[in-house]
Image (cartoon, rainbow, N blue to C red):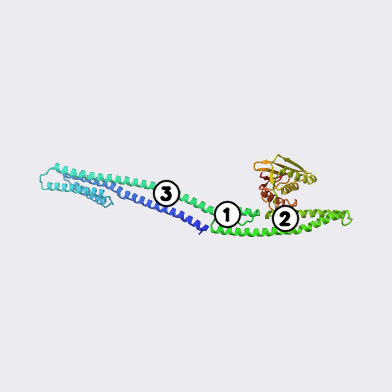
């Protein structure tokens, strides 16, 4: 089942949207991880570092107040000690409430245990002082100092752990960012490549059949109506292609009916026209009795117009036979130079009547496989066409020689030239370039030339600049 253009576009856009959505989800997940790590650094590690400073300050403050109190026994110093003790315990409690790893929690528990040891030693020393009992101050001082130093070392260990955690988390963030950036670039490149491939696929599935239809349109404009348009494309364009083929079949049928009509009418007209021509000639020869000069003039006009009609009828019949493939060709290897000279000689009287100079340039050429009578018809048509469009006093040049592809024959005139936009249509039947209505014609001569040259395996074309004459070229294979 072939997808329609809308379905192809929809699926293409959906695919790109899925890729973009997947990239967005991945980015959101990565951003969530970044947010979690950042929150952990701010709320846990940074808070723990701050609490480490507060705990250390509170513990040192306790030892300062405790030492001074033992010396001067000032109640204010003892209250300062209790305040520092309360602050230390409050900070320790806040630290314990944080979401800490087990190692940090164990370290805080050690700090709490050492702090309690320190407090117990201080309470015992106070009791000894109150009861006036002898005790070793140095021993108590060393024990308290040892407990405090051990607690500070644990706090330093916690701070180092916090710094390591921060470094590890920042490194993880950096790696995650690098990974996310790499994946984002990969997905972006994949989206771009997929979008490009899909755009080319969808565009080609549309433009290729349209190009075929454009080519077929040119064939139709050139009179080729074969219904052979086959395209592998979306259903909408396939339907259009089928409509094209139907149209071509109808046009081919109409064209065949038209050519059959022309052929039939031409055939039916030839007999009475021939009779009129022969009858007119008999009258001009005096077979029907003596005629006046005025009657002679009228009969001459009738004879000339009969010749024109017979030539037109013959042209229509020739073109009809050429298009249907019914015109027989007799090919033989022949020297084309005498044929060119003969055609030039035949148009001599017309050239003299219009005071047109005809020049002929022939170079050595090999023998060519051709139908002499049909090639003469080509040369006559080209020369007659050149003389018709060349004004009085102008020049027509005929040249023939060898070229890479075989033999090249050119007929150049000094006529008005042909507009560039009409160069492709002048070889079509019943077509003349617009603006040449003052040069009467049927538009069949060049069409016949094209068909005959194609039957010989050659090509014919024209080069012209408006206002600077035209050059018709015929290339024949050797």
Q: Earlier in the sequence, mark 3 or mark 1?
A: 3
Mark 2 vs 3: CB contact within 8 A: no
Q: Nearer the viewer, mark 2 or mark 1?
A: 2
Where does the image place residue 170, in percent across and percent down from the top left?
34, 46
Left-right relation of 289 to 372 = right
The local crowd at label 3, few if under 14, some if 14 to 19, many if 20 or more residues have their Cα within 10 Å, is some
Residue 190 visible (yes or no): yes
Tag of residue 418: none
Q: Nearer the viewer, mark 2 or mark 3?
A: 2
Residue labelled with disc 1? 210
Residue labelled with disc 3? 184
Where does the image place residue 451, in percent across and percent down from the top left?
68, 51
Measured in 3D between alpha carbons, the distance from the residue under mark 2 to the one under mark 3, in whole angstroms, is: 74 Å
The answer to whether 111 is drawn above or below residue 9 in the figure is above
Residue labelled with disc 2? 317
Residue closest to the eye, 360 or 178: 360
The local crowd at label 2, few if under 14, some if 14 to 19, many if 20 or more residues have their Cα within 10 Å, is many
**Quarter of the rendering occupied by the C terminus:** top right
Measured in 3D between alpha carbons, the distance from the residue under mark 2 to the one under mark 1, in whole angstroms, is: 37 Å
Where does the image place residue 152, in percent across and percent down from the top left?
23, 44
The local crowd at label 1, few if under 14, some if 14 to 19, many if 20 or more residues have their Cα within 10 Å, is some
Left-right relation of 9 to 308 = left
The answer to whether 293 is drawn above or below residue 469 in the figure is below
């Amino acid at each position: 089942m072939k997808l329609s253009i809308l379905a192809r576009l929809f699926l293409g856009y959906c695919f790109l949207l899925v890729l973009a959505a997947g990239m967005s989800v991945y980015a959101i997940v990565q951003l969530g991880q970044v947010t979690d790590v950042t929150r952990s650094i701010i709320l846990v590690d940074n808070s723990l570092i701050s609490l480490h400073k507060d705990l250390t300050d509170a513990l040192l403050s306790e030892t300062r107040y405790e030492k001074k109190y033992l010396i001067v026994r000032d109640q204010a110093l003892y209250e300062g000690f209790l305040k520092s003790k309360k602050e230390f315990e409050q900070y320790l409690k806040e630290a314990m409430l944080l979401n800490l790893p087990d190692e940090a929690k164990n370290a805080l528990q050690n700090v709490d245990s050492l702090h309690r040891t320190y407090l117990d030693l201080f309470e015992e020393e106070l009791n000894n002082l109150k009861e006036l009992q002898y005790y070793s101050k140095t021993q108590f001082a060393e024990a308290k100092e040892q407990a405090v130093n051990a607690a500070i070392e644990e706090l330093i260990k916690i701070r180092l752990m916090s710094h390591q955690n921060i470094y590890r988390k920042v490194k993880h963030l950096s790696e995650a960012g690098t990974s996310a950036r790499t994946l984002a670039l990969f997905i972006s490149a994949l989206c771009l490549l997929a979008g490009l491939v899909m755009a080319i696929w969808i565009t080609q599935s549309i433009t290729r059949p349209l190009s075929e239809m454009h080519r077929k349109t040119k064939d139709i404009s050139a009179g080729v109506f074969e219904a052979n348009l086959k395209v592998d494309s979306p259903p909408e364009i396939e339907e259009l292609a089928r409509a094209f083929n139907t149209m071509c079949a109808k046009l081919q049928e109409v064209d065949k009916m038209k050519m059959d009509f022309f052929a039939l009418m031409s055939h039916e007209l030839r007999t009475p026209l021939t009779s009129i021509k022969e009858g007119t000639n008999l009258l001009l020869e005096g077979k029907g009795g003596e005629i006046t000069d005025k009657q002679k003039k009228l009969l001459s006009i009738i004879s000339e117009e009969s010749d024109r009609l017979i030539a037109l009828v013959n042209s229509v019949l020739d073109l009809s036979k050429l298009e249907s493939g019914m015109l027989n060709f007799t090919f033989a290897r022949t020297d084309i130079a005498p044929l060119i000279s003969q055609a030039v000689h035949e148009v001599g009287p017309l050239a003299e009547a219009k005071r047109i100079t005809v020049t002929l340039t022939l170079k050595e050429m090999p023998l060519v496989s051709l139908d002499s009578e049909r090639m003469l018809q080509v040369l006559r048509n080209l020369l007659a066409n050149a003389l018709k469009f060349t004004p009085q006093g102008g020049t027509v040049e005929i040249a023939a020689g060898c070229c890479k592809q075989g033999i090249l024959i050119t007929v150049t005139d000094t006529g008005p030239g042909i507009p560039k936009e009409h160069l492709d249509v002048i070889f079509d039947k019943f077509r003349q370039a617009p603006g040449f209505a003052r040069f009467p014609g049927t538009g069949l001569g060049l069409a016949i030339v094209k068909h005959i040259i194609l039957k010989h395996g050659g090509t014919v074309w024209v080069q012209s600049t408006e206002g600077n004459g035209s050059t018709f070229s015929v290339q024949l294979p050797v």
